[in-house]
Image (spheres, grey):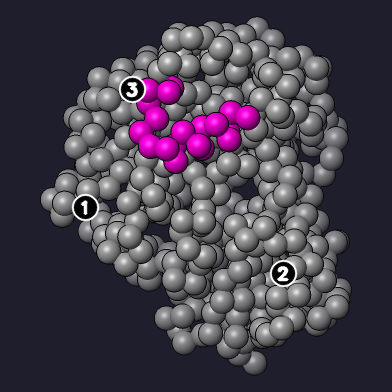
Amino acid sequence: MEFKKVVLINPANPSSRGTNRSTLYPPIGLAYLAAVLEREGFDVKVIDASVKNLSPRDVVAELSRDFPDLVGLSVNVINASGAVEIARELTKGQGIKVVLGGPLASTCYEEIYQRVKPYCIVIGEGEQSFLRVCRGEPLEEIEGICYLDKGSFLRVNPPSKPIEDLDQLPLPAYHLLPELRLYRSRARRYPVAPVITSRGCPFGCAYCNSSIFGRRFRAKSPEAVVEEIEFLVRRFGVRQIDIVDDNFTLEIQRAERILELIIKRGLNIAINLQNGIRADRLTPELVRLMKRAGVYKASIGVESSSPEVLRAIGKRPRLQNIKLAVKWFRDEGISTAAFFIIGLPDDTEDSILQTIEFAVRLDPVVAVFSRFIPLPGTPYHERLKKEGLLRINPCEGFSGGFFTPTGYFKHPVLRDEQIDRLHRMAYRRFYLRPKKIAEILRDMGSLKEIGWLLRSSLNIITELGI
């Protein structure tokens, strides 16, 4: 039986912490799913409970007013508790068929089935598999899902093949989402929309879960990327694009072509390279082109300055590349954010202190110090599980995210209070400098940006007790 009336849900997380609380992007993954279904003639609705502040009970009440044939829920480590609660209510109380997907569902499907009994779970990249589920094809024939066979035995089908030609995907169905002005992030201009120009990461860092898009890099053509950006600008009045790829500059010539086309078409947008790009995939020429295209902020993934820790997580310790990248961005007047992780399993107090001092010397405009959390399906998670150091089941989610002092695991060598102290020290050492405070205030280019800064700072100060 075909499920013609489909509702896709992005569950809320009322317990988010730090900058997670002040940053809320449109659920672009659900927008892609919705666009694929609409193209095939399905009646699709998207409920973004996160931006609407809807509790699981509110979501169930909204669905009960207009029952769909099938509900799709996106599950990650932050919204897991809310997603499972919604799924449980719908499957037990309402009898609605529920399909789960997303990074946590793709990794923790066995544990999820112990808590709730969905119709099936989509594992990995979802567009093709979910479309086949909605068409009503027999579950045993659909690659990339798992389901309870005869109500008791969990059957995991072979994985689906990743989409090779990403240009064939329709434009995300932003018209089904709440107004873009309701979302929040650090923005030079409003409204903001995220853009994903590629999928897959070949590097396999020990802390990172690649269960959705896999390890093989696949990219949209520059022409398709700029077509999507132009669509957002013309149709929705978007004035800033946040590129949220894991590897936007992996293919440097491709990145250059995208920026050249943005310039050629005169789109006049602000661009934020939100995710941490690799410093070894930059050139001075590329950075200059970024500036011309409208890039005002770029983020670099540093994680640690300890060569031993970097090797343990699978990164080559090329700190000189990072120093050069920050210099190149500063030379072009592009604001730079650097990402660091505090409390990695191979960290010691000395390595964390070394990283803090490196952050101060590196002196990007802003630094983000996240707490390590053992994401399910990562090498670090498997190691900590094997060593009996996990305090909770990560498959139940981490509602506090990367900025909570909660000890999700017992560190091999550090006490919880040591990590808490070092986390606070990192923010104090980096930010409590008159010169740094003045630079950050000068870097703010709009009242919206200043408002975001104040909210984020207050959240971090409150959560960490700085």
Q: Is residue 412 visible?
A: no
Quadrant of the frame with the N terminus: bottom right
- Rendered image: mark on residue 142: none
Which badge, 3 or 2, is on the more N-terminal residue? 2
- The mark lying in front, picked from 1 and 3, is 1
Residue depicted at 42% across the width and 81% down the height: 39
Residue 240, position in %: x, y? 35, 48
Q: Residues within 10 Å of mark 2 (few under 14, many from 20)?
A: many
Q: How far is mark 1 from mark 3, CA to CA? A: 26 Å
User: How many dots with numbers?
Assistant: 3
Say if 34 sits above or below 296 in the image.
below
Which residues make up the magenta segment?
440-458
Please determine whether, in this image, residue 395 is positioned above or below residue 175. above
The answer to whether residue 218 is magenta is no
Residue at 62 percent of width and 9 percent of height: 353
Residue ID for mark 1? 267
Residue 84 visible (yes or no) = yes
Residue furthest toward the left?
Answer: 264
State left or right for residue 229 relative to residue 153: left
Q: Is residue 66 left or right of residue 116?
A: left
Say what amino acid the circle numbered 1 marks: Leu
In the rendered image, which residue does mark 3 sit on?
Answer: 325
Judged from the image, the secondary structure of the residue bearing numbered disc 2 is helix
Residue type beneath disc 3: Ala
Number of the front mark, 3 or 2: 2
- Is 451 magenta? The answer is yes
Residue at coordinates 44% horizontally, 46% vertically from top-left? 244
Pointer 2 residue: 59
